[in-house]
Image (cartoon, coloured by chain):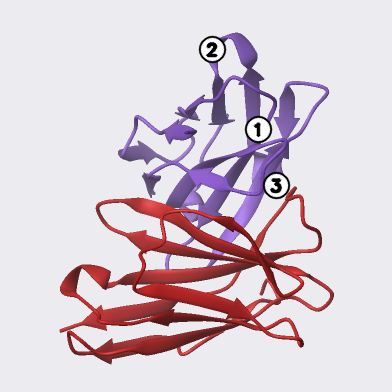
Amino acid sequence: DSGVTQTPKHLITATGQRVTLRCSPRSGDLSVYWYQQSLDQGLQFLIQYYNGEERAKGNILERFSAQQFPDLHSELNLSSLELGDSALYFCASSPRLWVNEQFFGPGTRLTVL
Amino acid sequence: AQSVSQHNHHVILSEAASLELGCNYSYGGTVNLFWYVQYPGQHLQLLLKYFSGDPLVKGIKGFEAEFIKSKFSFNLRKPSVQWSDTAEYFCAVNANTGNQFYFGTGTSLTVIP
């Protein structure tokens, strides 16, 4: 157990819908990272938040957004869902801004039908 | 942009065989290097990491990796694999001055008893 929690574990929805994935970092960690893992593209970095502020952006679609709240939990919002958004979404946390190790959550499996 | 290549997508070995998984990255600056493992149904866990110093890094469960700067490589090795090493292995790179992590597409290792 890494100490990072993600909910829900599984999510099934339809195209065009909007969903919210939630992540709680390890106690004391200020950075939260979101990743998308799909079969054809591997693990893709989406976005990083540090202490409530966006600090790095990767291959995140405009239909996706994220935020980190004062209690440091983070939410990833996915809207206008497409079949291709079906994937595992991982959250990771680390203690500091400059990464030297990340701790991953168990992931949320999103299926878009 | 940085990229990480893992050339072996699927590896099948018998128990006690030696393992070497390749990882090459493209980035001209100073990097931090990682190997993560994902056991079936579990989250990603850190196997080992390299920041600086001795280029031969030892990790958990008997794994080691060697950083060869001239070859932009960070190959993972284990002298004798066990059935319990069956998992997906990911190489990752982080620029020393950045927050983004770049992951390879992963290598699926199956160890046959």
Residue under label 1: B64
Question: In the image, what residue occupies the spot 31% across and 39% down?
Answer: B9
What is the x, y in percent for residue A2? 68, 71
Q: Are marks 3 and 2 on the same chain?
A: yes
Q: Nearer the viewer, residue B21 or A31?
A: A31
The amino acid on which the numbered mark 2 sits, given as a three-letter code, is Lys
Q: For numbered disc 1, what is the local secondary structure?
A: strand
Q: Which chain wears red?
A: A
Q: Are marks 3 and 1 on the same chain?
A: yes
Q: Nearer the viewer, residue A73 or B54?
A: A73
Q: For numbered disc 3, what is the local secondary structure?
A: helix
Q: For numbered disc 2, what is the local secondary structure?
A: helix
Q: Which chain wears purple?
A: B
Question: In the image, what residue occupies the spot 73% across and 21% down?
Answer: B55
Characterize the local packing of mark 1: few (<14), some (14-19) or many (20 or more) Cα atoms within 10 angstroms. many
Q: Nearer the viewer, residue B1 or A95?
A: B1
Residue under label 3: B60
Residue under label 2: B71
Q: Nearer the viewer, residue A102 or A22?
A: A22
